[in-house]
Image (spheres, rainbow, N blue to C red):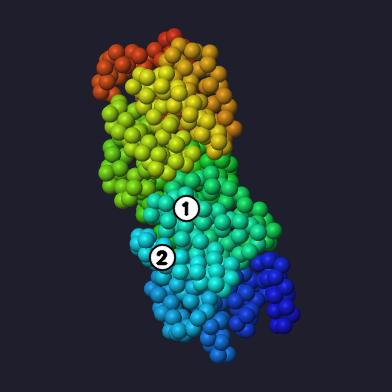
Amino acid sequence: MPADLTRGRRAYHRHDWSTAYDALKHAEKPEDLDMLAVAALLVGREEDAGNALQRAHNAYLKRGEVVRAARSAGYLVMNLMLRGEHAQAAGWLARCRRLIGQRDCVEVGYLTYPAALQTLMRGDVERSSEMFEHVLEIADRFGDADLQAMGRLGRGSSLIGMGEVEAGVAYFDENMVAITSGEVSPVVAGIVYCAIIDSCREIYDLKRAREWTSALDRWCESQPGMVAFRGNCLVYRSEILQLQGDWSQAMAEADKALIRLSTPHRQPAAGEALYQLAEMHRLRGDLARAEATYRQANDAGRSPQPGLALVRLATGQTEAAATALRRALDEAPDPASRWRLLPAFVEVMIAVGDLAAGRDAVTELNAVAEKFATPYLRARAAYADASALLAEGNAPDALRAMRAAIALWRELDAPYEVAKTRVLIAEACEALGNRDAAAMERVAARKALARLGAAGAPSMAGGLSARELEVIRLLAAGKSNRAIAASLFISEGTVARHVSNIFTKLGVSTRAAATAYAYEHGLQPGRT
């Protein structure tokens, strides 16, 4: 009805996307259908948006407006690519090129962009960089802000792929200015945001990703009903919220991501959402639920590592954890996948006493941190180095590395990582004989972990290390030092040292008291 169309148009122009979507559902004019497509996309109805664009394309053709028909179809191509329907996207792209022919118009840039994106996805970053530069030339010549934003996005991603990280992120930062100042349409803003978050995640530039998230959240708040993020984008948001210590919201975002990635059918990225949910369960100490969810992620095509190995470590199954991570590292399909495994690999190798393998992993992690030089990677590398140094008996150098790590984690405002590092600092202080400092660090760490709701993490239990947890479980089972040494394949002298450290950390003086502590805190044999 005309009244609905008027209401829908007005809602569209004031960015009330829910009302616009409801009121324009039965539109017939192509201009109204274009608006319906935007509103549908921004309330999370990607398939409805594609249908509206196809109808708009056909309506423009009936009116003889070939260029505008090609513009609608160009947006349809991007919609199909985002939904993973690449064969249909290729067909529509071919049709658009035929319609445009030799015309000199901005639509040529919109048709070049999907082809450049496909080239980038194939890994030909040098060719894609040239193609995106051509897109930018067209966008600048016609003064099209949306095409400029997409061109900058593609060019920046290509440069990062070529190793020119600083030059690449400069294009991203320019896009942030364009979006927050209102130069770019809402649809393109959502696309650009999600893609840049993904790129920042790949290079571990989580500080920049968090700034982008805050900026776009403020922008979205003024637009009722807006759902600007695809499912995989919600996963990235969950990871950022987790780092910030907002675990409840991180869980909510991961849940939303799983729903969006499972409707109307399960998409490949659903595995990432399941893995992120498993991570939240593990951090909160619900290890049984974490393991089940890691297995679901594996069924959905996402490797359950390193999270599942860390569950094994937390339950005292160190050899199983080590075997799983060694295999995962050997089979990592690309450098980025390998880098994500390294911090956990260092932790597990230290727990099983393979210090040489742990040190090799630290060296590799340091090389990655030097290459990208982001605070997150530098903090991860410093923490891993500190852990290895402490295990090697070099407490003074370990403490210096820990101080560097905790400064970087504080810069990133990562409370869980700060607390974990304080636990490690306490162990170093203990090794150096500074028990007062060790006690203060442990108290501060426990308070921070309690605020986060981080129940059941192995490093929380009296400040015990992963190896000390194994020892106390066996001790609580009534095993002698000799039997413990045989079970863990270490010397009796090493067991005696671990038992002494356990007594000191727990403030007890007998095996009976340590056993009682183990049962009181859920550390008895077989307990997960």
Discs 1, 2 touching: Cβ within 8 Å:
no
Image x and y of residue 101, in percent: 45, 84
Between 81 and 199, the one lying in front of the other is 199
Residue drawn at (53%, 86%) of the image: 66
In the image, residue 180 above or below residue 507: below
Between 78 and 319, the one lying in front of the other is 78
Residue drawn at (62%, 74%) of the image: 35
Q: How far apart are marks 1 and 2 (CA)?
A: 15 Å
Image x and y of residue 518, in percent: 44, 21
Q: What residue type is labelled 1?
A: Ala
The answer to whether 241 appears left or right of 468 in the picture is: right
Residue 167 is tagged as 1
Residue drawn at (53%, 41%) of the image: 243
Q: What residue type is labelled 2?
A: Glu
Residue at the disc numbered 2: 130
Secondary element under disc 1, as helix, strand or loop, is helix
Quadrant that contains the N terminus: bottom right
Between 469 and 349, the one lying in front of the other is 349
Secondary element under disc 2, as helix, strand or loop, is helix
Q: Is residue 49 visible?
A: no
